[in-house]
Amino acid sequence: MSEKLFLITDEVISIQEVVDKVVHPNAGAINTFIGTVRELTKGKKTIYLKYDAYVSMAEKKLAQIGDEIQERWPNALVAITHRIGRLDITDIAVVIAVSTPHRADSYDASRYAIERIKEIVPIWKKEHWEDGEEWMGDQLEKTPYPTGKPEEEHL
């Protein structure tokens, strides 16, 4: 795996590799958020998901989130890896690792990171259910992508 702090990959994510990127002698806390594929969403049974992304833009947006976190929590170190491609139930989709001198900042910065990922990073998914499939659009599911990718105005 690359040593990039902000990475989009089609490979299985190693939690430890993401955590290792933020280990620092001044860190008193490392918070790790692990997003996984769940089986049930609003009563529908998911078989698997397919994530896609505008990779170069997505990595820039992940780095932007890292910059935003360092502005808010100046001693934080952040690494984020998001997986694309087919993911089965319980597979890891995203790992966020944040180290800070104190635990409260680590929790807050980690929560901030996942919420910002949902807001600004061009990653989208196709849900495959028992009885059909659908491109879900942006990660907040507010803007549909019926063609399977965002239109120019959504990037």
Image (cartoon, rainbow, N blue to C red):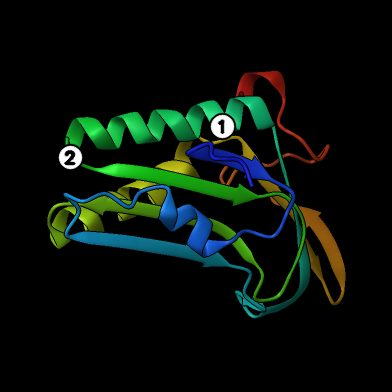
* Circle on res. 97: none
Residue kind at label 1, given as amino acid type: Glu
Q: CA distance from mark 1 to mark 2?
A: 22 Å
Q: Which quarter of the image is occupied by the C terminus? A: top right
Front position in the image: 13 or 27: 27
User: Mark 2: which secondary structure?
Assistant: loop
Please give left or right for residue 65 compared with residue 60 in the image: left
Residue 9 vs residue 43, the one in the foreground = 9
x 83%, y 37%: residue: 147
Evaluate whether residue 141 shows in this view.
Answer: no
Extreme-front residue of the structure: 25
Numbered disc total: 2
Q: Is residue 88 left or right of residue 82?
A: right
Q: What residue is shown at x 28% (from left), y 60% (from top)?
A: 30
Q: Position of residue 59 (x, y in %)?
A: 56, 32
- Amino acid carrying label 2: it is Asn
Residue indicated by mark 1: 59
Classify mark 1: residues with Cα within 10 Å, few (<14), some (14-19) or many (20+): many
User: Where does label 2 land, which residue?
Assistant: 75
Vertical side of 19 occupied by 132: above or below? below
Q: Position of residue 93 (x, y in %)?
A: 61, 59
